[in-house]
Amino acid sequence: MFVPATRPVHEEQLVFKGLKQGLTLFVPERDTFGHWLEVLERQLNQAKGFFQGGAILVELGERQLTPDELAGLKKVLAQYRIRIKGFNPVLRKKNNPRSEKRPPASTGVLLVKGTVRNGQRLENEGDIVVKGDLNPGGELVATGDIIVLGALRGIAHAGAGGNVKAEIIAFTLAPVQLRIAHIFSRAPEERKGRQGPEIAYIKGEKIVVERL
Amino acid sequence: MAGRVIVVTSGKGGVGKTTTVANIGTGLALRHKKVVMIDADIGLRNLDVVMGLENRIIYDLVDVAEKTCRSINKALIKDKRLSNLYLLPAAQTRNKDAISPEQMVAIVDELKEEFDYVLVDCPAGIERGFDNAVAAATEAIVVTTPEVSAVRDADRIIGLLQEKEIYEPVLILNRLRPDMVRKGDMMDVDDINDILAIKLLGIVPDDEEIIISTNKGEPAVLNNQSKAGEAFRNIVRRMEGEEVPFMSVNGEPGIFGRFLKLLNGK
């Protein structure tokens, strides 16, 4: 919160909080939006110089804005060179528990028949098995393991969401990038001559590749 | 029986889509097929130039879509060499949004009743122009050159074609340089097949004759001396269902045979 503590408590204020997603303005669900817009304008005016432009998030809860209300909000913020980069980071999290900490789960296997081509992206909560290749420019994202029964040349992200036990297996492992949980790695520039099934997993804080 | 509607596409620009359409169209017409080529590259039309028909354009694709001209036949330009070959040119002063996929379907539906082949020259890119060109097609020829970037784009296009329910596009590998392949400086057919894994329709060697013929507005397929022309004649024969062995481009006998076997084994 940036508001000086000396302010009288009875005066209504809007709350700014630094969340993981960024600085967020909280607009309560009670009262009219017009009321809060006035409060915001006064508040920003008093805190002049605190905001030197920048982008914020706005948390509205269940409140729906009319186009006019939204325009009004943008106008007030624009005076202080503040941009809105998104809405409802808190509400979203509530509705979408995926972004919350969650036990590494394998809920199912997505079987892909054929090649995943450049520009195609497949996601699955659980494992992904491809009966074909993953081509450069193609992307697989699984919360569990990824198995490619062909050549893996694109981007594979296993254990998305934090499962560090996830593995990536391919008959030919020649990826642009490997990602397991939060760890990213590029393949060494020259990996010719290494053919045959390989497995990638996390060891320590690194992704290691071994022959299967 | 309605004719075949084939889109020639690539994703990347400059790999030889227009040249391919001109040569295949001419080649099919030489075999007495009734062929119409549609230039779907509105705003950047070239097919008329490559065919040497630029000065005959009166109406174009957009005029047909907007019904500015009374009938589709008014806009069709008869080739100056072959009487069974026609061109429906693109508009030059408009852009891709000037027609919709639905209009394209309507135009092609009319044409395919009258022609054995409707060839659509697709613009580069994956936006509206691509959507228009692909809308009415039931078959696709993907053109690529032996460069990593072109192959990547071809791969993307094959994925997009599948979304449009064209599941078995075929490949033309254009501008292959046998000398460079031999030295290992150029991707060879196997490398490309590894990635794209679709049926090969033909390999066209890099050939100066193409540049000359493009500038003259005379497709190379008409020139019996041209290597590329020969490749296009073979492609046309394969399109017509003939089994034609692939030209040995890299000097090692059997490598293309091996490739063929690989394909047939599938």
Image (tube, rainbow, N blue to C red):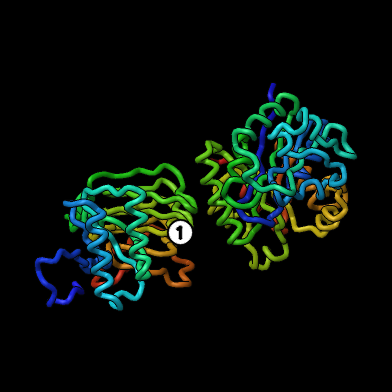
- At 63% from the left and 58% from the top, the residue drawn is B188
Type of amino acid at the residue the image marks with label 1: Arg
Quarter of the image where one finds residue A170: bottom left
The single residue placed furthest to the left in the displayed view is A9
- At 23% from the left and 45% from the top, the residue drawn is A107
Quarter of the image where one finds residue B75: top right
Q: Nearer the viewer, residue A198 or B19?
A: B19
Whether residue A190 is visible here, answered yes or no, is: yes
- In the picture provided, is A149 more to the left or to the right than A203? right
- In the picture provided, is A100 more to the left or to the right than B183? left
- At 72% from the left and 34% from the top, the residue drawn is B64
- At 45% from the left and 54% from the top, the residue drawn is A138
Q: Position of residue B73 (x, y in %)?
A: 79, 29
Q: Chain of mark 1?
A: A
- In the picture provided, is B160 more to the left or to the right than B83? left
Whether residue A159 is visible here, answered yes or no, is: no
Residue ID for mark 1: A153
Name the secondary structure under disc 1: loop
